[in-house]
């Protein structure tokens, strides 16, 4: 990645996208699930809302203060989330949601660390 200003810009852009995703998941879980993982059980929509709240808090914090330590902590949380999805990837009910959610979390973690400000 380029200079520090560019790193901060990319970090904030990614954090903004993550926070927006959090708002969407928290506010419209049924609409999101219907579009991306229709087999996901409706009685578990609270999990989608909880993920949305976590994403909003995590990415909102990075958006407000793109500190390298905060980015690393957020990436660690994303990697833990991705790992927690592994047992569900083959499930008929949860598999598609687990693959999407876990894959996006792992990708975000990798890109966030690569783009994070150095100081």
Image (tube, rainbow, N blue to C red):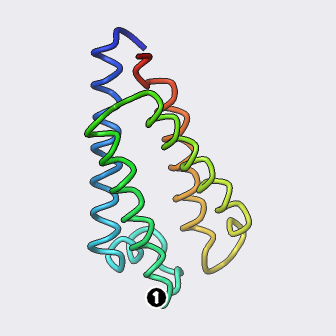
Q: Position of residue 68 (x, y in %)?
A: 44, 27
Label total for image? 1
Q: Position of residue 32 (x, y in %)?
A: 36, 71
SS label for mark 1: helix
Single out the residue that lies furthest toward the top. Answer: 3
Height in image: 42 above or below 61?
below
Between 91 and 2, the residue placed more toward the observer is 2
Q: Tell me if 29 is positioned left or right of 80 in this view.
A: left
Q: Tell me if 75 is positioned left or right of 116 in this view.
A: right
| Residue of label 1 | 42
Q: Position of residue 49 (x, y in %)?
A: 39, 73
**Quarter location, residue 70:** top left
**Quarter location, residue 12:** top left
State which quarter of the image contains the C terminus: top left
Seen at 44% across and 16% down, the residue is 118
Height in image: 2 above or below 26?
above
Seen at 31% across and 46% down, the residue is 17
Q: Position of residue 9 (x, y in %)?
A: 27, 25
State which quarter of the image contains the N terminus: top left
Height in image: 44 above or below 16?
below
Seen at 54% across and 49% down, the residue is 78
Seen at 69% across and 69% down, the residue is 88
């Amino acid at each position: 990645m380029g200079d520090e200003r560019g790193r901060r810009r990319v970090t904030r852009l990614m954090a903004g996208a993550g926070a927006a995703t959090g708002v969407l998941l928290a506010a419209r879980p049924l609409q999101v699930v219907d579009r991306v993982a229709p087999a996901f059980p409706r009685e578990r929509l609270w999990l989608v809302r909880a993920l949305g709240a976590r994403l909003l808090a995590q990415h909102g914090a990075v958006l407000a203060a793109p500190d390298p330590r905060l980015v690393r902590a957020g990436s660690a949380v994303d990697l833990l989330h991705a790992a927690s999805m592994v047992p569900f990837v083959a499930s008929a009910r949860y598999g598609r949601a687990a693959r999407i959610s876990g894959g996006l979390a792992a990708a975000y973690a990798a890109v966030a660390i690569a783009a994070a400000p150095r100081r």
